Image: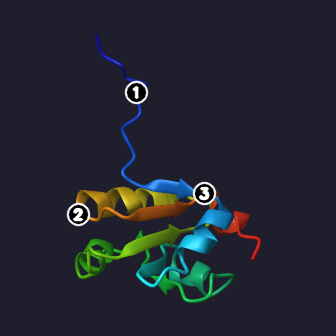
Amino acid sequence: MFNFFRTKEKKYQDLSSAEFETGMRAPDAVLIDVRTAGEFSGKKIKGARNLDLTSPSFEKQVKNLPKDKAYYLYCRSGNRSGQACDIMASMGFSRLYNLDGGIASWPY
């Protein structure tokens, strides 16, 4: 009758570090770090833009982004960036990619 354990369909793709690294180099790719400013000031991927998922202005900032780009998101472990992908998908973004394992899995 009810399936409480069913997971909802993801509207983004989790990518390995190698896939993410290749994809983020595309001309229409936008790299977004959704960690806090404090976390962002430490280890980060070169060229990333910081949009803190926990900030009250996150959705407002995302709303101003062009929807025709490919967005590569990451955080520390992949959890917050997955949540950010869900939010962006609900706002009409369709090309969303999440770094599986977050920056903790980034070998480059």
Point 55% across, 89% down: residue: 47
Q: Residue reaching furthest top? A: 1
Between 18 and 56, the one nearer to me in the picture: 18
Do the residues bearing badges 1 and 2 touch, measured as CB atoms within 8 Å?
no
Do the residues bearing badges 2 and 3 touch, measured as CB atoms within 8 Å?
no
Point 47% across, 54% down: residue: 13
Of the 4 image quadrants, the one containing the N terminus is top left
Point 47% across, 77% down: residue: 32
Name the amino acid type tagged 2: Met
- Give percent across and percent down for residue 46: 62, 88
Residue tagged 2? 91
Compared to residue 37, the image places residue 58 above or below, namely above
Do the residues bearing badges 3 and 1 touch, measured as CB atoms within 8 Å?
no
The dot on residue 6 is: 1
Residue tagged 3? 100
Name the amino acid type tagged 1: Arg
Secondary structure under badge 2?
loop
Secondary structure under badge 1?
loop
Point 68% across, 66% down: residue: 18
Name the amino acid type tagged 3: Asp
In the displayed structure, does residue 37 sit left or right of residue 88? Answer: right
Quarter of image, res 40: bottom right
Please rate how many residues cluster around mark 1, counting C-alpha atoms within 10 Å: few if below 14, some from 14 to 19, many from 20.
few
Q: CA distance from mark 1 to mark 2?
A: 23 Å
- Give percent across and percent down for residue 74: 54, 68
Secondary structure under badge 3?
loop
